[in-house]
Amino acid sequence: MLHVVSVEPDLGSTIFRRPRSTAETVDRAMSIMFAATTDRDIEVAAQINRGLEALENTRAGGELSGKDMGALLIELGRRSSGRKPYRKLQIHRYRPANTLGGVGRWLDFDQATVADLIDLGFADTVQHDCGRQGCEVPA
């Protein structure tokens, strides 16, 4: 099981104010880049999980759907190349409900700021919703 903790909310559903400086623009660009990379990595894990499930299903005599064919071919190709087979991976993603104020705030190591960020992270974790957060939980 893998736990992915982000310091940015879901960028697709967050309304941001217009950046007021070059630093804010760079911070936003970095956030978008990291979020896109994380999304892509979780989608690859989901595809591998689907391929493994399709392989298990065909071994049990089940039908193979068209959407699972590509994922199955990736897994079979990996196995035929002599590399270690993949295994199913469960990924839980944790994102704050709201923006934390950017790099300037979460690099502020003042005791009160750190305590506030820890409290926010705890509250967001307790209210974790796999469907809303885009977790990958294989069957």
Image: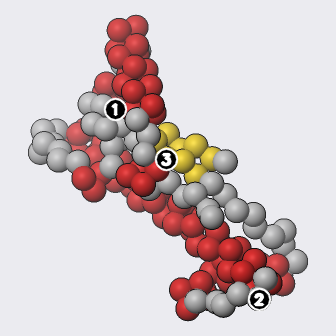
Q: Nearer the viewer, residue 97 or 80?
A: 97
Q: CA distance from mark 2 to mark 1?
A: 52 Å
The relative height of residue 20 versus residue 68 in the rendered view (above or below) is: above
- Label 3 environment density (alpha carbons within 10 Å; few <14, some 14–19, many ≥20): many
Q: Secondary structure at mark 3?
A: strand
Colour setup of the view: secondary structure
Q: Which residue is mark 1?
A: 103
- Residue 88, horizontal then vertical, whole percent: 70, 62
Q: Secondary structure at mark 2?
A: loop
Q: Nearer the viewer, residue 76 or 105?
A: 76
Q: What residue is drawn where x is 54% and y is 47%?
A: 92
Q: Nearer the viewer, residue 67 or 45?
A: 67
Residue type indicated by callout 1: Val
Which is more N-terminal, label 1 or label 2?
2
Q: Which residue is mark 2?
A: 61
- Residue 47, horizontal then vertical, whole percent: 58, 72
Residue type indicated by callout 2: Gly
Which is more N-terminal, label 3 or label 1?
3
Q: Secondary structure at mark 1?
A: helix
Q: Quadrant of residue 79?
A: bottom right
In front of the other: label 1 or label 3? 3
The relative height of residue 109 versus residue 63 in the rendered view (above or below) is: above
Q: Which residue is mark 3?
A: 93
Q: Quadrant of residue 7?
A: top left
Which is more N-terminal, label 2 or label 3?
2
- Label 1 environment density (alpha carbons within 10 Å; few <14, some 14–19, many ≥20): some
For residue 16, the mark is none
Asked if labels 3 and 1 touch by Cβ distance under 8 angstroms, the answer is no
Q: Nearer the viewer, residue 36 or 86?
A: 86
